[in-house]
Image (tube, rainbow, N blue to C red):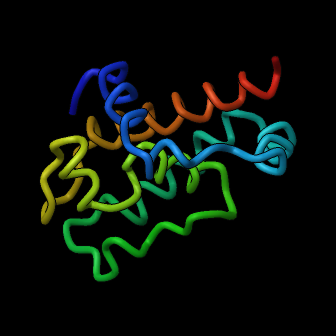
Amino acid sequence: MQDINYLFYRLSKSKFRSSFHLKEKDIIYINKKGLNIIENHAYDFINKRLSPSVILNDGKQTPTKGHPVFIAQHATATCCRSCLSKWHDIPKNRRLSEKEVDYIVTVIMTFINKEYKCFEE
């Protein structure tokens, strides 16, 4: 795990990662549900899809659309255990700790909040 500001700097240098942005329909969904519910969804997705020590479909468990958290996961390289290992130095093949889950959700919500503010301006 690393400093979030440095992480976002690194992600901005990746053509792939920096291509993900929330769309108007994502903002409408966030407005309807509220940021607290979106954060709850992030915890739920991470705990169910990334936290286990063995993930049979690793690299394919996170859709690229359909929920603001999914977009944020791809933008922040928190979409699979391989990306968590490469970008965040979180080892594969073991259950995520509570601290790691909190870190991942913080990264996701930081992205969502930044994108959300862009729509307000």
Location of the N terminus by quadrant is top left
For the residue pair 15 and 85, the one nearer the viewer reads as 15
- Residue 113 vs 105, above or below: the answer is above
From the top left corner, tell me how far across and down residue 73 is, in percent: 47, 50
Q: Residue at x 19, y 50 (%)?
A: 86
- Residue 23 vs 59, above or below: the answer is above
Is residue 45 rendered to the left or right of residue 120?
A: left
For the residue pair 114 and 34, the one nearer the viewer reads as 114
Is residue 79 rendered to the left or right of residue 108?
A: left
Q: Residue at x 27, y 21 (%)?
A: 3
From the top left corner, tell me how far across and down residue 65 is, in percent: 64, 63
Q: Residue at x 28, y 74 (%)?
A: 55
From the top left corner, tell me how far across and down residue 25 is, in percent: 83, 51
For the residue pair 101 and 18, the one nearer the viewer reads as 18
Location of the C terminus by quadrant is top right
Is residue 40 rendered to the left or right of residue 52?
A: right
Is residue 70 rendered to the left or right of residue 90?
A: right
Q: Residue at x 38, y 43 (%)?
A: 14
From the top left corner, tell me how far across and down residue 31 is, in percent: 84, 37
In which quadrant of the rendered view does residue 79 lie?
bottom left
